[in-house]
Amino acid sequence: MASSPISNLFLLLLSLLPFLPIFSASNVNPSSSLSANGDNSSWISPSGDFAFGFYQLNNTNTFLLAIWYANIPDKTIVWHANTTNPVQAGSKVELTASGLTLNDPNGQTIWTAQPNTTVSYGTMLDTGNFVLSDTNSNFVWESFSYPTDTILPTQILPLGGMLYSKFSETNYSKGRFELHFTNGGDLELNRVAWPSELLYLPYYSSRPANLNSSESGFQLVFNQQADIYIEKENGGVVPLWQNITQSSNSYYRATLDFDGVFREYTYAKTSVSGQSWSIVRYIPDDICMVLINPQLGSGACGFNSYCIANSGTPSCHCPPGYSFMDPNNNFGGCKPNFPQGCGVDDGTKKSEDVYDLAEIQGVNWPFGDYDSLGPYNHTQCKQSCLNDCLCDVAIFSNTTCWKKKLPLSNGKFEFAVAIFKEFGEEERAILTDWAYDCYMNGRLDILVDNDEAAIEDNVTLSRWILTAIWCIQEDPSKRPTMKMVTQMLEGYVDVPIPTTTTFSYSSS
């Protein structure tokens, strides 16, 4: 009997199956697993937009069990398992009928997602939501219900829902800020008294809560049009961000960033070389001005620093004579590079001979004064701080002089003059003698403030300190040439121990 056209077409399709492209499977079956071994193995959404698996951190042997954008060069993480620390190479996540289990290389369980029902399969959805489903295809667990710092279009925060920032740009530990959709239907941003879980008062609040329950918010919605709003019990909305020109050819996300700013971002799906995420909008407008607590906390930046916001993005700066506590974290506060307190000034010298003064125009630390004087002029304010051994900084504005002790907090731009007391040149020379004595007594740990990395390389540290001491010998003929200094620093020549403690200090 002659073949029908339909049956011929069916046979043709069967013959072509081995040559057709294989798309990512939608479902992940129980007994499936992934290992943290650096091969980027993951479970991919059907479109390829999102991946669930082990994300390798900075080419190290540490990983996050995470969800990230898989189709663009900037493979930004949008969710990760809430573990205390990143996991080590050799860790494994397995899907079973009980749910997901993450084990370390020794087989110890460090995280689970196990609903109270049997899991039939898992799915990485194109929305960025990884879900576990039962035999009736009902979601019994989903990553959208346990967000970290990011929400995505179609994602909802219910009453009591929250986001938490990461600690820094590269550290995914819980950071210093949280976003809460409170049980009263209010969206709040809070600073955390890190490393505790105590929250300071909110520095942003939407305040849609209403005594009439039908007017209160009951969920925060990020819809497919990239709008974010609070939906009320009666169906009304309180806009947070609306009416942008949304493009179906772009990705969108909203992230509580490590600096405390909640931002919505976009990224074109047709990736352009060198492209990065673009900020669409953000709250608050100026975190330097709003993140202020008169009694507690350091403000947007760490203690003894001040904050400048540019298009909503804060940057932290140290005043003259101060340096960052952690050179890799500008939000961690600043420390003075000289001794403080009344013990430095024993009363045998004039204050002018002990201290120098430096000024910053337009900066203020508005709280924590221990004295307020006036009416004073600028000169009187400087002299008052100079002659007061307790005074580390004075703020002068109009005819008032405020005196402060360290640490300083809530530093920001304001119409004022900040007057800083610094250690004078003669006293720095005394510090050089002290550094020499520390070296001779084998106390290099004191010189580097117990920095473990520096102490560990004791040979290099000793060579550098000795080189520095030779460079400030009072007799110029004893100072090495720059070529010799380079050779001494790089270890090409031995660095002898100076036999003199007479040094010359120059501030140039």
Image (tube, helix red, strand yellow):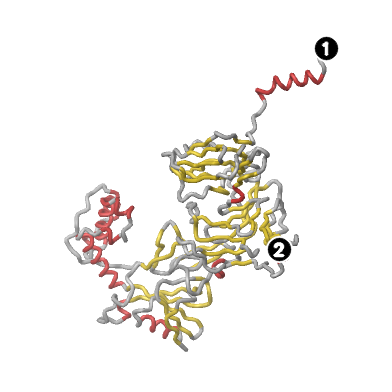
Measured Cα–Cα span from mark 2 to mark 1: 68 Å
Q: Does label 2 or label 1 sit earlier along the sequence? A: 1
- Give the residue at x 33% y 69%: 338
**Residue that label 2 marks:** 238
Which quadrant of the figure contains the N terminus?
Answer: top right
On the image, the x and y values in percent for residue 401 come to 45, 83
Determine the secondary structure under disc 2: strand
From the viewer's side, name the closer residue of 126 and 412.
Answer: 126
Q: Relative to 73, is 284 above or below?
A: below
Q: Relative to 190, is 89 above or below?
A: above
Q: Relative to 229, is 117 above or below?
A: above
On the image, the x and y values in percent for residue 377 come to 46, 86
On the picture, is 12 further left or further right than 475? right
Q: Residues within 10 Å of mark 2 (few under 14, many from 20)?
A: some
On the image, the x and y values in percent for residue 124 come to 62, 41
From the viewer's side, name the closer residue of 375 and 123.
Answer: 123
**Residue that label 1 marks:** 2
On the image, the x and y values in percent for residue 90 come to 44, 38
Instruction: State the image quarter where residue 500 is shown.
Output: bottom left
Q: Residues within 10 Å of mark 1 (few under 14, many from 20)?
A: few
On the picture, is 71 further left or further right than 345? right
Instruction: State the image quarter where residue 480 is shown.
Output: bottom left
In the drawing, what numbered circle is on residue 256? none
Determine the secondary structure under disc 1: loop
* Amino acid type at mark 2: Val
